[in-house]
Image: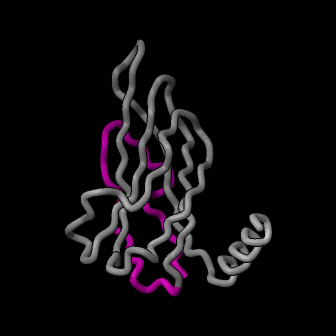
Amino acid sequence: MIDSFLVPERTVVTAKGDGRAVDVSSASNRVFLLTLHITNIVEQESLDVSIFGSADGAAWSPKPVVAFPQKFYAGQHPLLLDLTQHPDTKFVRAHWEVNRWGRGTEIPMFEFNVSMKEVPLDILKEASAEAKTLTG
């Protein structure tokens, strides 16, 4: 069961960058719950976090596998990462872009982390069954 961080807790960034590569090849399920947790920011700035995949941990996909919507405020933001359509993906990593505008310093500052937890198959089956019941 994979339970890791794509971006470690209390990471402070002022420019674009990449998190460490996390090996997902041992996952029994290819669906993960990602949580972007923004703990500290300054006003008038944005954070874009996307997730890229790789077969070997060296060459990364040209486009993200999934991306969080652009964020401007502190808080917790969940997102599902479904790699079932990407069977060759053995590694994932986070990439972030930051932007700042307005008055004061032009340097953005975000303190955040991105956690990643494998979603157990029984929970996925239960959620899918419930969704089918609700939709009809």
Answer with left or right where residue 58 lies relative to residue 25: left
Comparing 37 with 128, the one in front is: 128
Queried whether the magenta region covers residue 37, the answer comes back as: no
Magenta residue span = 1-28
| The N terminus - image quarter | bottom right
Q: Position of residue 106 (x, y in %)?
A: 34, 21
Q: In the current view of this chain or complex, which residue is farthest to the front?
A: 136
Comparing 23 with 132, the one in front is: 132
Queried whether the magenta region covers residue 22, the answer comes back as: yes
Q: Residue at x 49, y 52 (%)?
A: 113
Q: In the current view of this chain or complex, which residue is farthest to the top?
A: 103
Q: Kindly indicate the quadrant of the structure image that contains residue 128.
A: bottom right
Q: Is residue 85 placed above or below 106 in the rendered structure? A: below
Q: Kindly indicate the quadrant of the structure image that contains residue 75.
A: top right
Q: Position of residue 47 (x, y in %)?
A: 44, 39
Q: Position of residue 98 (x, y in %)?
A: 37, 37
Answer with left or right where residue 78 lies relative to residue 57: right
